[in-house]
Amino acid sequence: MIFINKQIKNLKPSATLAINQKVKELRAAKKEVYHFGFGQSPFPIHPRIINKLVHNAGNNHYLPTMGLESLRKQIAEFLTSYHKVPTAMDNVLVGPGSKELLFQTILILEGRFLIPKGSWVSYGPQIKSKGVQYDVLDTKLEDNFKLTPDILEAYCEAYPDEQKTLILNSPNNPTGAVYSSDELIGLSKVCRTYSVIILSDEIYALINFYQNTSPSMAEYYPERTFVFGGLSKIFSAGGYRLGFVRLPSEFNELSNTFRSLFSETFSAVASPVQFSAIEAFRMPKEIEYCINVNNTVLKLIAEYVHEKLSKFGIECTIPQGAFYLMIGFNKFKTKIKDKLNIDNSADLAIYILDNYNVALLPGLDFYFKPEDLFFRLAYVDFDGKNLIESNDL
Ligand SMILES: Cc1ncc(COP(=O)(O)O)c(C=O)c1O
C-alpha cells in the first residue's frame, strides 16, 4: 500500500499522450504516420550556440540560483529590444525551461486562475496539481480564439474581491494566433481596473510570420505582467531546458521568494547551457538571419495547410506564428455522429489516426468542450536542416 498526494493522483494522462503513444507504436510497426501532433522545432540549433556549450562542458560548478549575472543581463537586453519591454537584470530569473518557471509561479500565487479556451495543455494540470481549480474563459473562432475584453470583464465582475491570474499565450499554442497591440491594450484596461495578474507566455515571441517580434502584454501592463520565454522554440533548443521569467514592476520583491523556491528545488540551470544561452540571447546577426529563414519556411507551410483545408470547408484558425493552427469539423457533426457514432474530439482523433494514419490532437486537451470537434494541427514534423540546405534558403 502506498499513499500519494491526491492532487497528483487525480491528474489524468492527457489525450495528447495517448495519441503520441499510438504514433510511436504505429511507427515501430513500420506504418507511415502523418504526425500533426508533434510540437517541437524542426530546425537545428545554431552552431554558435552549440560551440559555446561545448566550450563550457568542463564547467562543473553550480551557478547562482537565479542564473548567471551575465546571462540575466543579456536576457534583459533581449527583452528590451525584442519584446520591447524595458527590463533590468534584477527582474530576470533563469530556470530549467519556462514550463518549470510557470509551475513555480503558479505555486507561489494564491487566488483564481483563468485560462482562455484554446490554451496550452500544461497550464491546467499545473494548477490542478496544487489542489486548485481553474476557470476557462470562452473564445470564438471569429476572433481566432483570442480572449476579448468583454469576456474578461464579465468574469472579473463576477469575482471582484478575489485575486485573479490570467494565463495569456501569444503567439499561441494551439491556435497560431498572435494578439495585436490594440487587442492587448483592450485587455490591459480591464486588467488594470480589476488588478488582474498576467502570466504572459511569450515562448514563441519571435516566431511571428508578419513582424520581427510579437507585441507583449508587459508593454501595456508592466506593473502586473510576468513574461516567460526561453531557448526552446526560437532557438530550437527544447532539450537544453533553459527558460526565463521577467517579474512585473509591482512585484520586484518576489525575486527573494523565487530564489528560495529555486534553491530548494532545482538549485540552478546546467552550467554549460547557461553559457550557451548568453550567445543565443546576444542574437548575433547569423542567428537572427536563421530565425528569419525558419519563419519563412513555417509561414509557407502554414499558409499552404490553411488554404488547402479551407477549400474543403474545414474551419481553420488563421496562423500568424508558432507551429500550429486549429482545425474544426463542427460543420460535419451530424454526419460524423450518424456514420461513425462519434460525438467528441478525443474519440474522433483516435478514429482518424486508426483509419487514416493522421495524428491530430483533440481540442479537449486545449480547454474546448469534448463535443466541440476542434483539433490542433502542428505542421513541424519535418527535417528543417535538410529542407533549408536542399532549397538553398
Ligand atoms: C505555449 C508553451 N509554453 C511553454 C512551453 C514550455 O517550454 P519550455 O521548453 O521552455 O519549458 C511550451 C512547450 O511546448 C509551449 O508550447
Image (cartoon, rainbow, N blue to C red):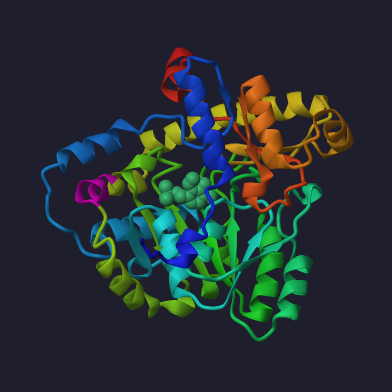
- The foreground one among 374 and 204 is 374
Above-or-below relation of 349 to 168: above
Residue 53 sits in quarter: top left
Q: Is residue 216 magenta?
A: no
Any magenta on residue 272? yes
Q: Nearer the viewer, residue 136 or 90?
A: 136
Q: Position of residue 355 (x, y in %)?
A: 67, 21
Q: Quadrant of residue 155?
A: bottom right
* Number of disc labels: 0
The reply to whether residue 51 is in sight is: yes
Q: Residue at x 20, y 51 (%)?
A: 271
Above or below 51: residue 12: below
Q: Residue at x 41, y 61 (%)?
A: 101
Magenta stretch, main secondary structure, is helix
The residue lying at 56 percent from left, 41 percent from top is 16
Image quadrant assignment for residue 193: bottom right
- Work out whether residue 317 can be spotted: no
Q: Is residue 206 left or right of residue 335?
A: left
Picture coordinates of residue 356 (x, y %)?
Answer: 67, 20
Q: Position of residue 278 (x, y in %)?
A: 29, 49
Residue 336 against residue 224 in the figure, above or below: above
Residue plotted at (52% across, 60% down): 10
Which residues fall within the magenta stretch? Answer: 270-276
Q: Percent x, y for residue 279?
A: 29, 44
Residue in the foreground of this view, choosing between 328 and 284: 328
Q: Quadrant of the N terminus?
A: bottom left
In the rendered image of this protein, does residue 392 appear above or below residue 161?
Answer: above
Seen from this angle, which residue lies furthest bottom? 161
Determine whether, in the image, residue 69 is placed left or right of residue 193. left
